[in-house]
Image (tube, rainbow, N blue to C red):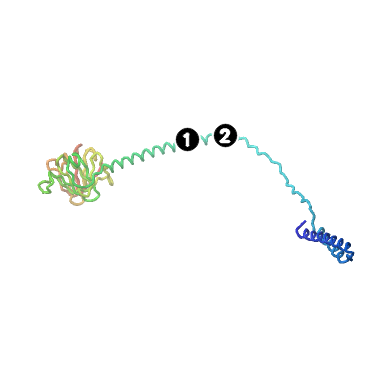
Amino acid sequence: MNNFSLIVFLIGVLGIAVSLIWVLANLIKKKSPKKVLKIFGGSIILAILGLILNPGNSTPTPTVTETKPVVATVAKEKTPAELKIEADAKIKADADAKVIAAQKIKDDAAAKVIADAEAELKNSIIQPGMYKVGTDIKAGEYVIVSDQMAYMQVSKDSTGALESIIANENVQNRTIITIKNGQYFEVKNGEIYPISKAPKVASTDNQLPAGMYKVGLDIQPGEYKVMSQDSGYVEVSTNSSHTLGGIVSNDNFTGEKYITLKKGQYLKLGDATLKLK
């Protein structure tokens, strides 16, 4: 029964009950119950109306869902050819993975070698400055490298007097110098390396640029052609002391000329290049 029909029905029932009580009271008092009978009749009508308005407690028809039968999926059995293809593909994938892993190990090892070499080279650099040999720097053979014009000087004392200079040079690209205990070694605008830690010599267009090279280390012994477009200088020496006593031959030249180099000698080029074989 909905709310509205329930209210109507209850009003009707309440009216009937009140009317009955009223009728009994009037009968006791011997009064005419006509007015009460009208209320009683109206209450009956309201009660009946409430019942009529009630749609009833009908039971809803259950919804029936159609159940479809479950069909089991049966895996298709693979043919021997398909199984072989799968096996070959797995073997190839495993082999490729092993090759990639092996290559990565090699690449990592090569990268480590390069990184270690770069770190060692960086740690080998001695910065420009003035050093007392045997106190600030070890005696030995060193390479000075610069991408600009550098200056190198070896002195017997720290007075700064001209007569104290043992050797000096304006450096083009690179030079090699041997220093001894008690001497003073000064470099401006260049990096200093022990000769065993120095960067490898690089050629351009199969030519060595101006600089100083050790035969047997930086260049192989033999006969070479040296070239200069203007006024060049070439020197062959027995050592890297940069003193007159070590010079085997030297020459200021223009154009081209041949020189012969022996193992252990040193080659110095100023404003000139050497053609490699």
Instruction: Name the element at disc 2.
Output: helix
Left or right of 22: which side holds 63?
Answer: left
Question: Percent position (x, y) of residue 138?
Answer: 19, 39
Question: Percent position (x, y) of residue 84?
Answer: 55, 33
Write down the quadrant of residue 52 in the picture. Answer: bottom right
Left or right of 177: which side holds 91?
Answer: right
Question: Percent position (x, y) of residue 235?
Answer: 17, 44
Residue tagged 2: 83
Left or right of 134: which side holds 116?
Answer: right
Amino acid type at circle 2 is: Leu
135 or 140: nearer the eye?
Answer: 135
Up the image or down, 211 lies above or below 263; here it is below
Question: Percent position (x, y) of residue 71?
Answer: 68, 40
Residue tagged 1: 95
Which label is found at residue 212? Answer: none
Left or right of 93: which side holds 269?
Answer: left
Amino acid type at circle 1 is: Ala
Quarter of the image for the N terminus: give it.
bottom right
Quarter of the image for the C terminus: give it.
top left
Up the image or down, 101 lies above or below 272; here it is above
Up the image or down, 90 lies above or below 2; here it is above
